[in-house]
Image: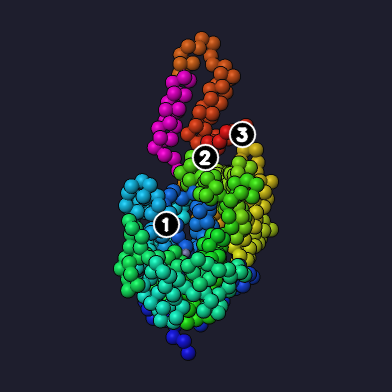
Amino acid sequence: MIMRNLGVLGSLLTNRSFCTNKSNVLVYNYKTKTKEPLKCNKLLTWYVCGPTVYDSMHIGHASCYIKFDIIRRILENYFQLSVFQVMNITNVDDKIISKARALNIDPLKLARNYEVEFIEDINLLNIKQPDIIARVTDFIPQVLNFIQNLFDKDLVYSADDGSLFFDTTKYTRYGKMVKVPEIVPHMFKKSNLDFALWKATKPGEPSWDSSWGPGRPGWHIECSAIASHYFGSSVDIHSGGIDLLFPHHENEEAQCCAYHNVDDWVKHWIHTGHLHVGDNIKMSKSLMNTISVKELLNSYTANQFRTLCLLSNFKNDLEFNDSTMDVACGVLKKLDSFIANCYAHLNTYNSKHIPDITLLKKISDIENDILINLADNFNTSKALNLLIELISIFNKLLTVDFHFNCSKLEVIQALNLVVKTLESFGIDLSRSKFKSDAENSLVIDITVNFRSKLRQLALQSKSGISKQEIFELCDNLRDELSLANIIVQDSKISSIWRHEKIQAKKN
Ligand SMILES: [Zn+2]
């Protein structure tokens, strides 16, 4: 019997069972190319491939982390799993070294600056921080131990410059995730599929001593060494963008199965689709068509971009353009307006209706359907459509003065369902109500100015103020308040307001 290596986390869990518990959640697994019941214990272990910190994060990367954040929140909020998530930071790499050289600064310092910016960006996007953020340079002993283990198993060879390579020809299960390319001759590797475990140092590069000479870790080994350190010989979920499926994840699976002497290291490999910026063009640094997170947030809110991510399945490609963002903004506006109408109804309307059993059952059915769809590979798009269906039912009950023609109980139930669902997906409702100090000052200025104009009008008027003049002033006030993101909506007998960030539309 193979003894499982439990890793740091496993050794802390005295009663952790490695018998496989299947949950009722179906997840698309890239290893088997099918949806499978999620296999995990109450504590779900999850490794996320993190960024190489040599530049600002663009929204293609951001969409990937948002989608994983949504899945994490669904697993925690709907399926009561405790998620323990580890993410690496690649802080030594060819791109970092080359940029640092161009800027004449220390590569590790450059990486640290972009790591700080990455954390700022994930906070701005309301992405939960992983439980552990692990820099590869803090795991050099683990990397060396990993390589030594593979060396002892005769799976490693040394190239002329002292770099070490994993010998894919000696690992019989290579090609588990994808049909690998044909083997062709290579200048300094035995096979073009072989990959670097340890890169021999070159002048001016960061390096660490090893029994094979000074050098630095190859990219693939860092994730395997860090994940194995925390989780041992079995990881429930390992995730990344679809670009990482091959060779990164194929290589990780191969070297980890060899290291741990297991047939399968990861139970579920999950990948997110690309973000496209029109005509099937992927957003990437090499195509020079990137939009940074901060640039995005000049035009749209984090909630609006997250809504775009929610409107398609995480594994599909995502189209980012004005029209898809208009759809996302429209959906979020509908949800926001519904919440505002519910609060207006509950705060100001003394309904004499008795509860309607049919309507209450409909709300309950929609809640069940949302759960069923989330259990089917996290179908958030269907869940949002179900909320829109619920809102349509209630909007038919909306009177001209923004009250629902039903009892408070149905409104409370519907409001709770909408708020709970959005918050469970990481839509931060406090942000949509949030008013900055600048906005608060603007509202006070606008209101004082309005009062002053009304007083002047009264003082100057000899024959009384006309109805038209008052309406004009009121309309101007409504327009000005929208500058502070306060939207006022009038009916014949009352007015309601909501806070809504107006996006700065690009030309
Ligand atoms: Zn990785």
The answer to whether the beta carbon of the residue marked 3 is less than 8 Å from any atom of ligand 1 is no
Q: Amino acid at mark 1?
A: Asp
Q: Would residue 149 be seen by someone viewing this image from the given angle?
A: yes
Residue at image point 62% right, 32% down: 492
Quarter of the image for the C terminus: give it. Answer: top right
Is there CB contact under 8 Å for labels 3 and 1? no
Image coloring type: rainbow
Crowding at dot 3, Cα within 10 Å, few <14 / some 14-19 / many 20+, comes out as few
Image spot of residue 34 (x, y percent)? 64, 70
Looking at the rendered structure, the kind of residue marked 3 is Ser
- Decide if residue 349 is on the left or right side of residue 216: right
Front label number (3 vs 1): 1
Residue displayed at 44% across by 86% down: 3
Q: Nearer the viewer, residue 251 or 131?
A: 251
Mark 2, other Cα within 10 Å: few <14 / some 14–19 / many ≥20: some
Reading the image, the residue beneath label 1 is 94
What is the three-letter code of the residue carrying label 2? Ser
Residue 444: within the magenta? yes
Secondary structure beneath dot 1 equals helix
Q: Which residues are magenta?
A: 433-454
Quarter occupied by residue 357: bottom right
Measure the alpha-carbon separation of dots 3 and 2: 31 Å
Q: Which residue is mark 3?
A: 491
Whether residue 223 appears in this view of the structure is no
Q: Are marks 3 and 2 in contact (CB under 8 Å)?
A: no
Measuring from the top left, give residue 35's x and y in whole percent: 63, 70
| Element on which disc 2 rests | helix
Q: Position of residue 186 (x, y in %)?
A: 53, 67
Q: Which mark is residue 299?
A: 2
Residue at 56%, 18% in the rendered image: 469
Based on the picture, tell me whether residue 350 belongs to the magenta stretch: no
Q: Is residue 105 left or right of residue 356?
A: left
